[in-house]
Amino acid sequence: MSKKRINLDPKQRSFDFDTPIQEYETLRIKLLAGPEKPLRVESYEEACIEIAGTVKSAIRSWGGSREELVDAINAYFGTSKRLSIHMLNHYLSKPTEYPLPAVLIYAIQHITGSLETIATLAQAEEARVISGEEVRKLAIGKLDDAIAEMQRLKKEFRGIKK
């Protein structure tokens, strides 16, 4: 008897199963490798410049202007004139003369959605900051591992019973 040949519709969309698996594997390898090389800060001035640089980068990636950021920071803390555009410009342009107050980082990371400044501070101590999405991916990965282990044990147990 001959086997019936199955014709596939060429217009049918195929699913890319390999990409999510590859992304998962890449993330897993990166996480298992450990933190990056610690960023050693040599001086007070260098630390001020590094923090100002990460804040500037966060503002650029956010896409808003410095004026919008000042308004948002003042709204975040519930004041109208706590921070002026002139002071923010000083903090970012002359960071060694006017170091950025740490309390502003709360508002900046909330408004811009960037954890870059905090990540830089953590990297100096060989630590890593991860977002909520990354935490959820880690939890899913742990659940996947636990489910796989439970299924393996279940198969093993069934094999013993017989």
Image: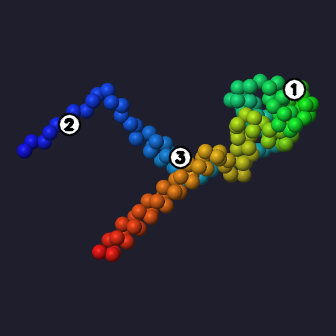
Mark number for residue 85?
A: 1
Looking at the rendered structure, the kind of residue marked 3 is Leu
Q: Position of residue 64 (x, y in %)?
A: 74, 25
Q: Distance between the residues labelled 3 and 2?
A: 38 Å
Labels 3 & 2 near each other (Cβ < 8 A):
no
Q: In which quarter of the image is residue 150?
A: bottom left
**Apparent side of residue 152 relative to residue 9 in the rendered image (left or right):** right
Disc on the earlier residue, 2 or 1: 2
Which one is in front in this view, the residue at disc 2 or the one at disc 1?
2
The relative height of residue 162 versus residue 43 in the rendered view (above or below) is below
Q: How far apart are marks 3 and 1 (CA)?
A: 40 Å
Q: Mark 3 points at which residue?
A: 27
Quadrant housing the N terminus: top left
Q: Position of residue 132 (x, y in %)?
A: 64, 46
Q: How far apart are marks 2 and 1 (CA)?
A: 69 Å
- Is disc 1 placed on a helix, strand or loop? helix
Q: Residues within 10 Å of mark 2 (few under 14, many from 20)?
A: few
Looking at the rendered structure, the kind of residue marked 1 is Ile
Viewer-side residue, 146 vs 100: 146
Q: Residue at x 66, y 49 (%)?
A: 128
Looking at the rendered structure, the kind of residue marked 2 is Ile
